Image: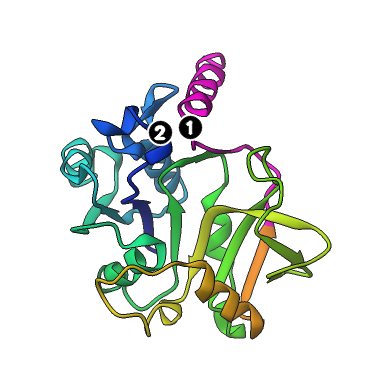
Amino acid sequence: MKAMILAAGRGERMRPLTDTTPKPLLQVGGNSLIVWHIRRLAQAGITQIVINHAHLGAQIEQALGTGSAFGVSITYSPETSALETAGGIRHALPLLGDAPFLVVNGDIWTEYDFTVLHQLNWADGRLAHLVLVDNPPQHPAGDFALNKGKVLSTGATQYTFSGISCYQPALFADLADNQPAKLAPLLRDAMQHEQVSGEHYAGEWYDIGTPQRLAELDEALNGRK
């Protein structure tokens, strides 16, 4: 299985930190956010990684190189301007191949075990699998519901999409290349056809959306040393 790390966002809410540093390169607990992901992917046996970038993308390539220092192989999918989540994935499809692939947002921190996603059965026609978490204080309404392993647009209990997922390339095949496109409409359409599965993850997960949340996580991780 290949993995894609989404690293093209501008990080407006993280300014002024992101005026000079791409958001995925911000440091927590002695490593950049993106390096935490790369190491966890490598531990799960996922060594072929695609990273998209736009804002200050050259810094990401300079920091990570080919990935050999982490025991992985990194290929980059540069975007002249950010294509949003679905557009960025569509643009990277030639690098991701024909098999299902893992996607993780570059601006989260988690202890989720990526090996879980190796065990998915795609023979049932699903197009996507989402990892959902309890709603954090900054997003109390959640995104989607979960019922018997299927993800729904609405339900009695709403959860937040963690930014960790797996997709079939077919989900993005009809999108025009190099054009911005949002992910949620694609997912909601697939949900109507019961083609989106999901799981609830109750472990550690942080959405690094503000400098304050970055500082709080950094303090917590440094406190474990």
Residue behind mark 2: 14
Does the magenta run of residues contain 213?
yes
Q: Is residue 129 left or right of residue 44?
A: right
Q: Picture coordinates of residue 206 (x, y %)?
A: 56, 37
Residue 212 vertical placement versus 71 (above, below): above
Tag 1 and tag 2, C-beta contact below 8 Å = yes
Q: Which residues are magenta?
A: 200-225
Q: Nearer the viewer, residue 155 or 150?
A: 155
Please, what is the three-letter code of the amino acid marked with disc 1? Thr
Q: Residue at x 29, y 57 (%)?
A: 82
Q: Earlier in the sequence, mark 1 or mark 2?
A: 2
- Secondary element type, mark 1: loop
Task: Please tell me in which quadrant of the rendered image residue 125 appears.
Answer: bottom right
User: Which label belongs to residue 133?
Assistant: none
User: Which label belongs to residue 210?
Assistant: 1
User: Separation of disc 1 and disc 2 at Cα?
Assistant: 5 Å
- Secondary element type, mark 2: helix
Residue 76 vertical placement versus 24 (above, below): below
Q: Residue at x 47, y 50 (%)?
A: 44
Please, what is the three-letter code of the amino acid marked with disc 2? Met
Q: Picture coordinates of residue 17 (x, y %)?
A: 33, 28
Q: Picture coordinates of residue 193 (x, y %)?
A: 64, 86
Considering the image in quadrants, where does the N terminus appear? bottom left
Colour basis? rainbow
Q: Dot 2, how many residues are within 10 Å of its Cα: few (below 14), some (14-19), or many (20+)?
A: some
Does the magenta run of residues contain 78?
no
